[in-house]
Image (tube, rainbow, N blue to C red):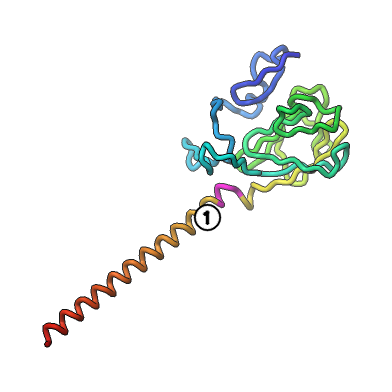
Amino acid sequence: MKLDRCKNGHIYDVSRYSSCPYCKSEGLETEIQDDKINLVEQMEDEDRTTAYWSKDSTVDPVVGWLTCIEGHDKGKDYRIVSERNFIGRGENMDIQISGDTMISRKNHCSISYNPKQRKFMLTPGDSNGLIYLNGEAVYNTVELRAYSVMEMGESKFVFVNLCGDYFDWEKEKAREENVKRKHENLNDEKIVKNTNFQNKNNDLEVKIEEYE
């Protein structure tokens, strides 16, 4: 087996595939640059993407969790961040599950969060071992829903999402910006009122002087 990583970040067996099979199943075409911002992103329109934090920020916001409910690491939770999360026993994996030797070292599977559609997707990796979702074997990319049970190796995990229909970092960012704009508008209104009040006082002083 000869593993390689495609331009979109998938690890696949180049001895079995001439091109990345995961990109095809997920409908991906855009190249992800090496210096991409690994933060939650949200499309504001069809052609433009913006990030929440600056490029030099160390924050990688969580979008969901996996919690081991059966196996060697029972009770342990794993953070899921935006974009792709490769799962395996190796130290270079985004989610390292080191206690279960039946889980492949590299890319047993991956979980992706699609910020445009606010959906989570589960994709099988290059492991000979299968993964199961709610008791069904997974052969292609499928949607991952809240409280679904994943099985790989000798372990079971419950998936819990943070982002989705009821919360998203982009919505939270927009809410904060709206609050900020309201405060700015209130401050502008206060300035205008104070200016108008001062002008009235000046006019009154002029009229008093003229009367005298």
Please state, as top left, top right, bottom left or bottom right, where the N terminus lies in the image. top right
Query: Secondary structure beneath disc 1?
Result: helix
Range of the magenta residues? 168-172
Q: Which residue is located at x 74 percent, y 46 percent?
A: 160
**Residue 120, above or below 93:** below
Q: Is residue 191 above or below residue 16?
A: below
Residue drawn 56% across the image and 25% down it = 34
Q: Main secondary structure of the magenta part?
A: helix
Q: Residue at x 47, y 35 (%)?
A: 47
The quarter holding residue 152 reads top right
Q: Position of residue 156 (x, y in %)?
A: 84, 38
Q: Is residue 11 magenta?
A: no
Q: Which of 142/14 is in front?
A: 14
Number of disc labels: 1
Q: Is residue 117 above or below residue 177?
A: above
Residue position for label 1: 175
* Residue 91 visible in the snapshot: yes
**How far from the left and from the top, in percent, is residue 113?**
64, 38
For residue 35, side relative to residue 62 (left or right): left
- Across and down, in percent, residue 128 comes to 81, 22
Is 164 placed left or right of 106 in the picture? left
**Label 1 crowding class (10 Å Cα cut-off): few <14, some 14-19, many 20+?**
few
Farthest bottom residue? 212
Q: Where on the picture, by quarter, is residue 14?
A: top right
